[in-house]
Image: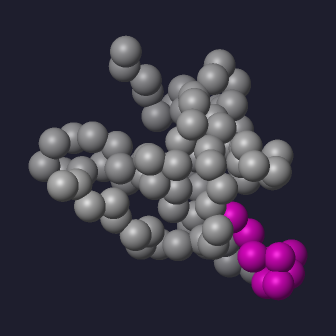
Amino acid sequence: MMIKLTDLQIKEVIVINDGRRLGHISDLEINGDNGRITALIIIVKDKKAGLFGKPGELVIPWYNIETIGSDVILIRDVNTPSLYPEQKLIE
């Protein structure tokens, strides 16, 4: 089944461990060799930066996704925002 980025962007991303709402997807990270999605990217605002703080990116590796529903994307806990998450090694 093919899903468009715009269809993913309207779904809210929620952590299933504690119900935190992370927001909506702003972009995708795609493997250039095989065309597969490797991560979801969400824009998050640093609470310490104040009202006019520069937003950061939260990269959620594809393997953290539990399910993509009709209106939400449920993910396993993401510990900290990261531009370069640890890659799972394929053996």
Does 6 sit above or below residue 90? above
Which residue is farthest front?
91
- Left or right: residue 75 compared with residue 49: left
- Left or right: residue 36 compared with residue 23: left
Estimate the x, y position of residue 82 in percent, counting from the top left: 53, 72
Q: Residue at x 44, y 68 (%)?
A: 85
Q: Residue at x 64, y 68 (%)?
A: 79
Which residue is farthest left?
33
Residue 56 occupies which quadrant of the picture?
Answer: bottom right
Name the quadrant of the N terminus.
top left
Which residue is farthest right?
51
Q: Residue at x 60, y 71 (%)?
A: 81
Name the quadrant of the C terminus.
bottom left
- Is residue 47 within the magenta segment? yes
Which residue is farthest top?
1
Residue 42 occupies which quadrant of the picture?
Answer: bottom right
* Magenta-highlighted residues: 44-52
Does 65 sit above or below residue 40? above
- Is residue 43 within the magenta segment? no
Looking at the picture, the colour scheme in use is: one colour
- Left or right: residue 55 compared with residue 41: right
